[in-house]
Image (cartoon, rainbow, N blue to C red):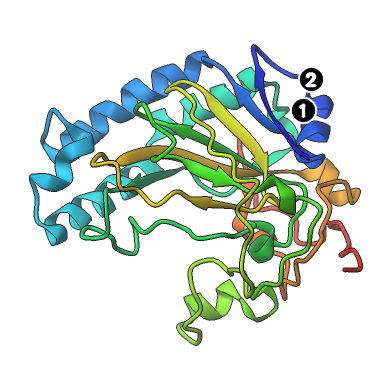
Amino acid sequence: MPVLRAVSGALEDGQRRGSVYGGGLLVFEKVPPMVELCAYADGLIREAFETGDPVRAQFELGRDEYLSRVEALQRRFRGDGTARELFLAALGHAGVDLRRTFWDWLYLRVSPHGDEHAGRRTAGLGFHRDTWSSDMYAQTNWWAPIYPITAGRTVAFYPAYWEKPLKNASREWDLEEIRAGTSSAPVVPGPTEAVDTASELRPVIEPGDLLLFSGAHLHASVPNTTGLARFSVEVRTVDAGDSADGRGAPNVDGEAPRVASGWFRHVEDGTPYPRSRRVRPRNAV
C-alpha cells in the first residue's frame, strides 16, 4: 500500500517520477521558494480580505462579499508572475526537469469553515481521481498549505484504492460539454458506489512543505468544520516524455471519453501540450 514519505532536498527526476507512478506520497520539506511563496501569498490574501486574520475573514464578511473577494483573489493569483516564478523555483528545487514539464495553472484554493460560505470557488471536492477527468496517467499533483493546517483542514487520501477499482462516472463526464453548458455534471466525476474509508490518510504538513502525489490517487477535500479557513496552492504537471512513452500510474477504473491534453502548457514558454502525444493505454478492469 502506498505510504507517505518525507524528502529533504531534491530527488533525481526519474526516481521521483517512478516513486509517484508507484503510488508514493512525497512531502518535500521546507522548500525555500515555497516558504517565500507562502509569505508572498499571505500578503495578497490579507490585502484581498482587508484583514489581519485571513483564516477568520469569513466571519467578518457576508457570504456574497466573501465569495466575490475569493474570486478576485484567485483570478489575481492565477495571473501573478511572482507567484508563478516562485512555484517554478519550488519545482526545480524538488528536482523537476522543467524542460520536459507541462502544467495546467497555479490555483489558490480557499476552503472556508462550514457550508455557509460555500460556492463554486470555495466548495470542497468529494472522492475522485484526477485521472477520471484528465485521462493522463503521467500526471502528478503538487499541493501546499499557505497557513498551518490540521487533520480537520487538509486533503484526505484512500491508498487502499491505489490498485482497487471503484465504480465511477468518468465515462459520462466530459469537461468540454460542461464548458459548453450542455451538461449538468459535477466539477469532477465521482464514484457511483460507496467508498470504504478505512485506509484514510490525512497528511498534515507545514507551510513551506510541498506534497506530491499521482493524479491517479483517490482523494478528497476534508470537510472543514474547524472554525478556520484553509488556504492552499496547487498545480498539476505532466512529464511529456513519460506520457509520450506510455509511462505513468496504472489505470484501474478510469473511462474518460477524451484525453485532456489541452489543459496543459509548457511551464517555461507556454507551448500547448502536443495532442499527438501517446498516453498510457487503459488496463483491463
Q: Please state which amino acid type lies under the numbered disc 1.
A: Arg
Residue pushed farthest bottom? Answer: 182
The disc at residue 16 is 1
Residue 44 in which image quadrant: top left
Residue 266 in which image quadrant: top right
Say whether residue 219 is left or right of residue 118: right
Q: Are marks 2 and 1 in contact (CB under 8 Å)?
A: yes
Q: Please state which amino acid type lies under the numbered disc 2.
A: Glu
Query: Mark 2 falls on what kind of element?
Result: loop
Q: From what the image shows, is residue 170 above or below residue 208? A: below
Residue at 65%, 81% (x, y): give it: 172
User: Can residue 284 be seen at all in this image of the molecule?
Assistant: yes
Q: From what the image shows, is residue 78 above or below residue 3? A: below
Query: Mark 1 falls on what kind of element?
Result: helix
Expressed as whole percent of the image width and height from the top left, the position of residue 163 reads 81, 53
Q: From what the image shows, is residue 168 above or below residue 199? A: below
Expressed as whole percent of the image width and height from the top left, the position of residue 155 reads 50, 43
The disc at residue 12 is 2
